[in-house]
Image: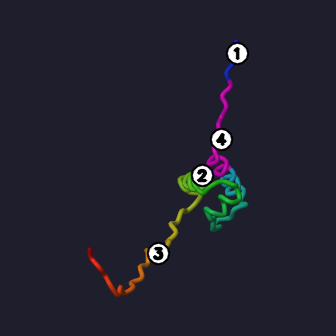
Amino acid sequence: MATQETVERVTSTDHIFQDLYARIMSLDLLPGTKLSETEVAKSFGYSRQPVREAFTRLANLNLLLLRPIWTMSFTACFVWQPVDHLRLT
């Protein structure tokens, strides 16, 4: 009779979460340390989405304080130029 082994799938979010969790618990990351989503993503070689999900999981455990970043976006700029001759047909 063959036995079935359960293989646990570890996602990129799990990998980031487990690493950051261990670093927080071992005080490699000290309280008050600022973490950049972009920098953490680069260090792990992942996109920002799994980092964002790992940050949310850590915040749910009260291990990380999430603060929104205020961003500024520019609207399109239109340059008005006078038209000498406008012909409507």
Where is mark 4, residue-wise?
10
Distance from disc 1 to disc 3, alpha carbons, whole Å, reads 63 Å
Residue type at tag 4:
Val
Q: Residues within 10 Å of mark 3 (few under 14, many from 20)?
A: few
Local secondary structure at mark 1: loop
Considering only order in the chain, which callout, 4 or 3, is on the residue closer to the N terminus?
4
Where is mark 2, residue-wise?
50
Q: Residue at x 68, y 60 (%)?
A: 42
Q: Residue at x 64, y 65 (%)?
A: 31
Residue type at tag 1:
Ala
Rendered-image quadrant of the C terminus:
bottom left
Distance from disc 2 to disc 3, alpha carbons, whole Å, reads 28 Å
Residue stretch in magenta: 5-18
Residue type at tag 2:
Pro
Q: Nearer the viewer, mark 2 or mark 1?
A: 2
Image location (x, y in percent) of residue 51 = 61, 55
Image location (x, y in percent) of residue 74 = 46, 75
Q: Where is residue 78, by image quadrant?
A: bottom left
Image location (x, y in percent) of residue 13 = 62, 48
Distance from disc 3 to disc 4, alpha carbons, whole Å, reads 40 Å
Local secondary structure at mark 4: loop
Q: Nearer the viewer, mark 1 or mark 3?
A: 3
Where is mark 3, residue-wise?
74
